[in-house]
Amino acid sequence: MENLNGYLIISAILFSIGTIGVLTRKNAIVIFMCVEMMLNAVNLTFVALSRHLGNLDGQVFVFFVMTVAAAEAAVGLALMIAFYNNKESIDVDDINLMKW
Amino acid sequence: METLFFLIVSLVAIISAILVVTCRNPINSALSLILTFFCLATYYVMLDAPFLAAVQVMVYAGAIMVLIVFTIMLLNIRVNASKSQSHKIVLGSVIGFFTLLNTAVIVFKSRVALPNGPLTGDIIKQQGHTELIGREMFTTFLLPFEITSILLLVAIVGAVILAKKKI
């Protein structure tokens, strides 16, 4: 457990790639997957720093992040299916009405 | 040896993460994302957190990705070759690059505090990671744990209501 900076840099790279994906892609499911990747990058930071500091709090926090990600997956994918039933598409460009 | 292994896993993680963003077909993106999750599980093993690695594989690579792949196949979206799949690539890439630059500067400029907790590699090997994390979760973090269960209940109810045609 010497190269703490290596883990942090990997985490930063994954987070940035996820950011690019969220900002550039049009498919809502791909955007969703990129958000999951960003959450995972943050989890890696939590675990690396928790191990470095010798404190378990960060790893317990990773659990809560995973729970939120699971809840987000369930609700988000249900939303996408509901949207697809109405519009026959999941491009974020087509999501432009509050009510129809 | 460990450094070499770390570099190989990093290479795989970064390439699969780039594939998630660049693949045109969402299924290919999903499979690359599973590979990224496995690489992260490998990192957790290297960081003496085997229980978290198992949870990562089961919850992320198992449950969440199955849900995503299931949705992709259920919706059966055809990839339209003529239509553009992305927008504002340059702007998004610049913003992503500056995010990376920012975090890299923070990582290299800052000094991390010295280890101050009781946890060392020996203690983890002696007591077991699962036992340590379970004890922490059910004593110090008992209230957040219970609130998490309520969050999951809300998610279940919300998903059922959203997916249902008529309530």
Image (tube, helix red, strand yellow):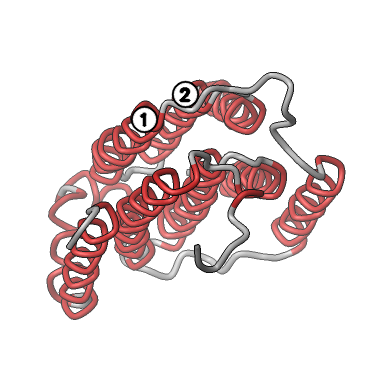
Residue holding disc 2: B27
Decide: is B36 above or below B153.
above
Residue drawn at point x = 86 percent, y = 42 percent: B90
Decide: is A27 above or below B25.
below
Q: Chain of mark 2?
A: B
Q: Nearer the viewer, residue A68 or A5?
A: A68
Measured as percent of width and height from the top left, residue A65 is found at: 37, 60
Q: Chain of mark 1?
A: B
- Label pair 1/2, CB-CB below 8 angstroms: yes
- Mark 1: few/some/many CA within 10 Å (<14, 14-19, 20+): some
Q: Is residue A60 left or right of residue B7?
A: left
Q: Amino acid at mark 2?
A: Ile
Q: Please give the count of numbered marks on the rendered protein.
A: 2
Residue drawn at point x = 69 percent, y = 19 percent: B81
Residue drawn at point x = 44 percent, y = 50 percent: A83
Measured as percent of width and height from the top left, residue A56 is found at: 32, 63
Measured as percent of width and height from the top left, residue B1 is found at: 51, 21
Secondary structure of the residue carrying tag 2 is helix
Q: Residue furthest front?
A: A100
Q: Nearer the viewer, residue B3 or B41?
A: B41
Secondary structure of the residue carrying tag 1 is helix
Q: Amino acid at mark 1?
A: Val
Give the spatial CA distance, label 1 vs label 2.
7 Å
Residue holding disc 1: B69
